[in-house]
Image (cartoon, rainbow, N blue to C red):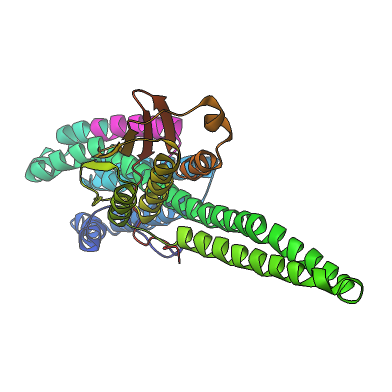
Amino acid sequence: MQKWYHIFSKNTGLSIYIWVVFCILPFYFIIRFSTPTEVFIGVLMIVVFFTTFRLSYIKKGWTVYLSVGIEMAISIGMTLYFGYVYFSLFLAFYIGNIQNKAGFITLYVVHLVTTISATTLGFFTQSQIFFSQLPFIIISVIGVILLPFNMYNRIKREKLEHQLEDANVRISQLMVMEERQRIARDLHDTLGQKLSLIGLKSDLAGRLLQKHPEKVHKEILDIHQTARNALKEVREMVSDMRSTKLEDEINHAQQVIGAAEMNFHLEGNPVLDRTPLLVENVLGMCLKEAVTNVVKHSNATACSVMIQQLPGEVSIIVKDDGIGIGSTALTKGNGLRGMRERLDFVNGSLEIENRNGTVLSIKIPNVVKQQSEERLS
């Protein structure tokens, strides 16, 4: 953050030493004149220029344009009277900081016209001074033409980069919130019903203990089985939440399909490049669910998995030669619904076709990988 006493903008792209030279040069041009009045007027103009230049970074609204107008008048005066044209570069850098498009264009045109006019007139009034510094004057005029646009685009790009960084932070926060909500839903669906059932059966067993002790054993067995099922579902849920490499899931899928006495064929490289861990985890979980459906419901003899890594997206196509998938399974299948929910979370898509079996296509766009990824534990 710039302080009030900083004269130069920090994002000019020029070394501070160059700006120091530009600050010292006007005094050199002034002391060449021997008249004390001329020296006093010149020093006063320099002080007023730098004071106004600094205030123009602090002020807002119409006072900014008033400050720039004063600076332009001083720059013209220094050019015509003392032969010092380099205040125009200060103005060129400052005008580039104005992000209001109409204000930027207006000040840019006015500054360009006044600078060229004052410089041209200076060649007629003080030809010796101006011709002696002709190369530097040409560079200054080119700077007046190009530097405002360079600064304007640079600041605009930095602003967009900051907005993108803030958006990425916000997306990360939303991803954490969504994951927490998903875990809460899974815990509720997994444990809520089971614990309620265990509580009811425990109460029932307590009531039956005195009147019908022979039925208590059955209720206790039911409680034991319900608890085991709940523990199994919790373990499966935790296993799903762990970060899984797609390569590991491919190996697991090959083992499952082989155990089901199906032929397995793989196309593409399961080792993903430049893919965020979250995206790879979602791909692995969807592949696991797709292979499970093939084994359980397809009655197929072969299953193939094709992995495509394109610049814009990553896709996995799972194909089998089974009986196909019915419309009821498409709309009511819990596994497919879970896959769609996971894919929606990363802007992915799921397509299913009946084509000599079932063809399931999973696509997830490639997102910019952040410097620090949040790993699921």
Q: Nearer the viewer, residue 361 or 261?
A: 261
Residue 321 location (% of width, % of height): 32, 30
Q: Nearer the viewer, residue 301 or 194?
A: 301
The single residue placed furthest to the right in the displayed view is 211
Q: Nearer the viewer, residue 36 or 276?
A: 276
Magenta-colored span = 98-116
Residue 100 location (% of width, % of height): 46, 36
Residue at coordinates 19% horizontally, 31% vertically from top-left? 120
Considering the image in quadrants, where does the N terminus appear? bottom left
Residue 74 location (% of width, % of height): 35, 45
- Is residue 76 visible to us here? no
Considering the image in quadrants, where does the C terminus appear? bottom left
The single residue placed furthest to the front in the displayed view is 214
- The magenta stretch spans residue 101: yes
From the viewer's perspective, is 51 left or right of 180? Answer: left
242 to 78, vertically: above or below: below
119 to 132, vertically: above or below: above
Residue 317 location (% of width, % of height): 32, 36
- Is residue 85 visible to us here? yes
Q: Quadrant of residue 138?
A: top left
Residue at coordinates 47% horizontally, 49% vertically from top-left? 167
- The magenta stretch spans residue 223: no
From the viewer's perspective, is 127 left or right of 108? Answer: left
Q: Quadrant of residue 20?
A: bottom left
The single residue placed furthest to the top in the displayed view is 355
Q: Nearer the viewer, residue 174 or 234?
A: 234
253 to 327, vertically: above or below: below
Residue at coordinates 56% horizontally, 60% vertically from top-left? 233
Predominant secondary structure, magenta span: helix
The single residue placed furthest to the bottom in the displayed view is 210
